[in-house]
Amino acid sequence: MVSLTGSQMQVAAIDWHVYLLTRSPLALGLVGLSRVIPIVSFSLLGGVVADRYDRKKVMLATQTTLTVVAVLLGFLTLTGRESLWTLYVLTGMTSAAGAFDNPARQALVPRLVPPEDLPGALAMNLTMFHVGMIGGPAIAGALIASSGEGTRGLASIYFLNAVSFLGVVMTLLGMGASGKVEDVIQKDSPWTSLRQGLRFVFTTPIMVWTMALDFVATFFSGANSLLPIFADQVLRVGALGFGWLRAAPALGALVGSVYTSLKPIPARQGRVLLWAVAAYGAATIVFGLSRSYVLTFVALAATGLADLVSTVVRQIVRQMITPDAMRGRMTSVNMIFFMGGPQLGELEAGLVASLFASAAFGATVSVVSGGLATLLVAGFVAWRARIVRDYRR
């Protein structure tokens, strides 16, 4: 939670930093591209590494890398040497480290609890994740606003993020569960291991459909990179308001994760998933059309709640049907879809918004059209994919 709070502070700060330098929707969209290229390039390799080497040691290496990147961001910003391209490159390095960190992390979680407690544990893990996503942007917005919305506040955010990684390092060092993988995996070549993981994922129909649904929905509705425009030009609430808008989806997700931790999701999880995706699209439309700060905040919180429900369902399905020895590779393949979708969606949102002379009007068109497309995708999957519609735990 401590580390994620720092990471989300940095994510929000990067978007605001790019906006201060350019005032361009396209430049904000390219932040998403700088995040997704390393994910696509390295996530499959990250899955192989997570299934061949000690997962705790892998995470220690990635957390050290993330710390170094945050320190570099802070130093360059503090000395006034940052540029648009250095922000893109260092953001890409953060995503590259995450491509190795996430498969190892996800593969380690099921070892911490008995199988019957895994759904609740996954929901609690998401709760901590969303606490960080609420606190991070809110703190970032306050720090930026208190420093006169200049770069001094941004530098302090990057340095605080570097310190926050100590939370993960201390947790890993004190964790009793083993991070070692089964010896049988070591007998296969990395290429063979990768092919086995790809074959498992793409020959499991429920996994293919849920991956595709997640990717397409978040591609069309991924517009968080445009929030600086909404905060500055549409709602006129400045950096502090931007921070809270950025935190709003996580607040809604936190409510949902606490609820799903205490009360299991109904057995007919396929229909729950489809309704959650449809609600995500509808809330996105409201966010795009709103000119009220309160309504925008509520709509963004609703997107977070809907996304949380769909995420819990998808994680339960994936973790339950995947053998432990293959969880790292399964996660790495899914990463391309569940992380690539939102980041490519930010690029798509920026491109659509940049087609219009007014950044505020372009952002509105981009967000509303993305929400409508998400509704259509949910309807199509409900119509065509019976395996999803009728899926029961």
Image (cartoon, rainbow, N blue to C red):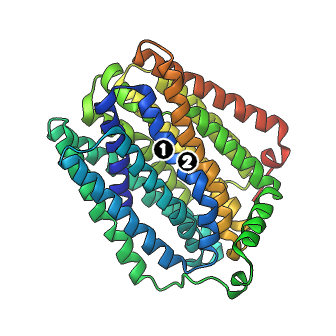
Give the total number of marks visible in the rendering: 2
Please tell me whether mark 1 sits on a helix, a strand or a loop. Answer: helix
Depth order, front residue of 237/263: 237
Picture quadrant of residue 147? top left
Q: Answer above or below: position of 234 versus 261.
A: above
Say whether residue 142 is left or right of residue 257: left
The amino acid marked with disc number 1 is Ser
Numbered circle sitting on residue 34? 1
Question: Could you say where residue 126 lies in the image, as x and y percent from the top left?
Answer: 50, 58
Q: Callout 1: 10 Å neighbours few (<14), some, many (20+)?
A: many
Question: Could you say where residue 48 lies in the image, as x and y percent from the top left?
Answer: 64, 70
Numbered circle sitting on residue 80? none
Disc 1 to disc 2: CB gap under 8 Å: yes
Numbered circle sitting on residue 37? 2
Q: Is residue 1 visible?
A: no
Say whether residue 104 is left or right of residue 232: right
Q: Quadrant of the N terminus?
A: bottom left
What residue do we see at 20% from left, 41% from top?
151
Picture quadrant of residue 379? top right
Question: Could you say where residue 370 lies in the image, as x and y percent from the top left?
Answer: 59, 27
